[in-house]
Amino acid sequence: MADTKRTFRSPSKTSTEDVDRDSLEPDIESSVTDPSSGNNKQRKPNDVDWTEVNKRLRQHGLQPLKFLHPADVQHLGGNVICLDAPGGKIARENYIALIADCDRRQDLVQELILTNNQLKDDVARQSAMTEKYFGKMKDLKIMLESSRARVQEMEKSASKSSQRSSSHSPSRSVSTEDPEKLENTKAAILARCKQLEYKCEAQERELERQKNKIRKMAAEAEKRSSRQQQVFQEFKKRTSRAHNVMDEKLLDVIDSYEKQIQNLQRELEYFRSRDTSDVERPEGFSDTDSTSFLSVPETSDNLKDLIRGYEKTIKDQNHQIKKLAETKDLIQLDMGSRPEVKDYRASQLRIKKLEKLLSLHNIGIPGERKVIDPFRLKRKFSTRVDDLEFLPLDLCHHYIKGICAEFEIDDLEEMLPRIQKLSSDLDSIQICEDFCHNVQDLVNSRDALSDTNRKTRLGSPKRLCLTSGMLDHLMSILENWKQDEDDLEELQLSLNRLSERVAPWLKIHLTGEPSVSKIITAMDKLTYDDDVKAEKENKDRISRTVLENIVQHIQTLFDIPSISGIYARMNDVYTKLGEVHNVLNTLKNLLGLSPTCKSSAIVDAVGRLFTAHQSTTVKQLKQLLQTEDLDGIIRRLEEHSEFFPAFYEIMNRLFEILDVRRMDQVIPAVRALKMLTN
């Protein structure tokens, strides 16, 4: 297999060839151009395999390999790598194995990411369920404690009532019974037994009445809650929401009206029952009882007094029972109006949320000790516009104070006009800066040197930073230009007088607006006059051959195609040479150099001056922005540009929400809302 070698060229070695990426893909049939070699059939499967490898490399963002015919290797020198068939097969298999391993690792990383996200979701779900169960357990504990307290209170009240009934019955019997008067009186004993039986029956009826009353009150409470919900739906066209301040206020108003209606109905029933009870007979006696009691033949006056005392006592007891019933109704109404355990639970949760919100914004309650969070300084809050609602108030105050200190203002109402004025000043400053740069470009174009060494050292011309020294230099140059322009008129007059004295036959007389082109033309006429040239030739006696050689040499040096363009070219060269000399002399005077120094010394001095000026400017910029690197300067400017729109937007929202017009009214309004929520 020695004649089936494959030649590869690395894509990194082809930097000298300007080819496209598609040209790196080999054309199998065109690259194998020797049909007599007998190996075309053997190379085609290998070429197809390497094409597949190149496709897979291209899919992974890598550059493909280029392989050439062995006949083309001798033209490429040492920029190729030669492999035989077994080596090419091993390299191809290694490439395919590495690409497959890369795909497998990528799939494994994706699976790990998905598994990690699922585990995070499971942990969050489990924590939410745990918090929910803990809340339910706390509520159940509170309900259990309240039910235990109620049971204890009911047991105490039941024991007290039983003790009271047992203590009153013997005293009443002792006080009412007269053993001397009722001795051997069978009818009195029977009456006493009946009285006790009626009393027991009355207590049973009272107990049933109280149970019925409790059930009725429960039904009324349910009806009242249903009426509240119905009235709320009629008002709001929706059901009430839990822990909503406005909904709770509306429900309280409806509840108060319901209580007033119930009180009026109760009073009406009470007055109706009182009117009917005045007509009825005392409780505990019927017609049969009175006839049986009065039909005893042994009744006497003492027995009648005893009956009257019983009747009076029964009336007093009935009156006390009514008063106790009214007191009980009032107590039950008061208990119904008091908040329940769930209300206390909701209020505690809201208080905790408010305390957390106050601690987040670093706001202390007046009269209490301020608690400082030790980890607050280590937290980093986002200052983006989207996260502005979560930014603490003290940080907002810090940013506002920094802006006020930067603008040197004492009233926040002056901030927006100051920013608007600053933006307008920036626009005008930009216009002035563009004008100054244009003037600088114009001056640099006139003062540009043609020295090749300076061009290679400084490179392409760039716009420098505008400083006071630069502006003074530009101003001095503009003043010199203005002075030169004003002196053109005097120069024109002097040239007219000179032409009248030297060559009056040329009739050179310049009129109108003075210009440099007119003056140069007149000077050319005076300088290169035929008569003057003839006199010079006669004086110097230079041969024609020397003059022709001089003219040809000048044409060769300055690339002048015709003899007529020599005068203009030489004038231009002379003018530029004078300008260069003037610039060099000016720079020597400004830089404090000796008049005999070389041009390279001037260039070195200007370079040192530019380096010192640039380093001073960079130091000033770092000191102003309080950062040491260029990325920090850019970041500070971006933060500054992001904060102003966010601050303006949040203050507008606060003005709309709190319904205030000035900045100093925001904090009192927020405090009022805080006190109202507390």
Image (cartoon, grey):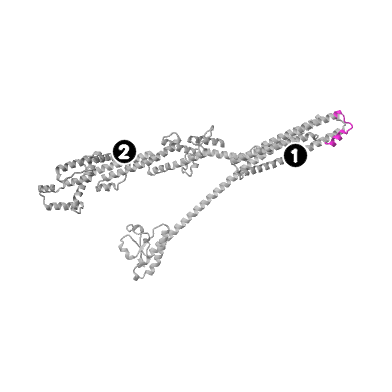
- Give the residues drawn in magenta, as a range: 286-303
Give above or below for 27 relative to 209. Answer: below
Distance, label 2 to label 1, CA atoms, is: 104 Å
Q: Quadrant of the N terminus?
A: bottom left
Q: Secondary structure at mark 1?
A: helix
Where residue 42 appears, as percent x and y from the top left, is 39, 68
Q: Which mark is residue 248?
A: none
Q: Which amino acid does the dot numbered 1 rest on?
A: Arg
Count of numbered circles in the view? 2
Q: Which mark is residue 468?
A: 2
Ranked by sequence position, the earlier of labels 2 and 1 is 1
Residue 43 visible to an observer of this rendering: yes
**At 75% across and 36% down in the image, what residue appears?**
272
Q: Quadrant of the C terminus?
A: top right
> Horizontal and vertical percent for residue 326?
72, 34
Label 1 belongs to which residue? 209
State yes or no: residue 298 in magenta.
yes
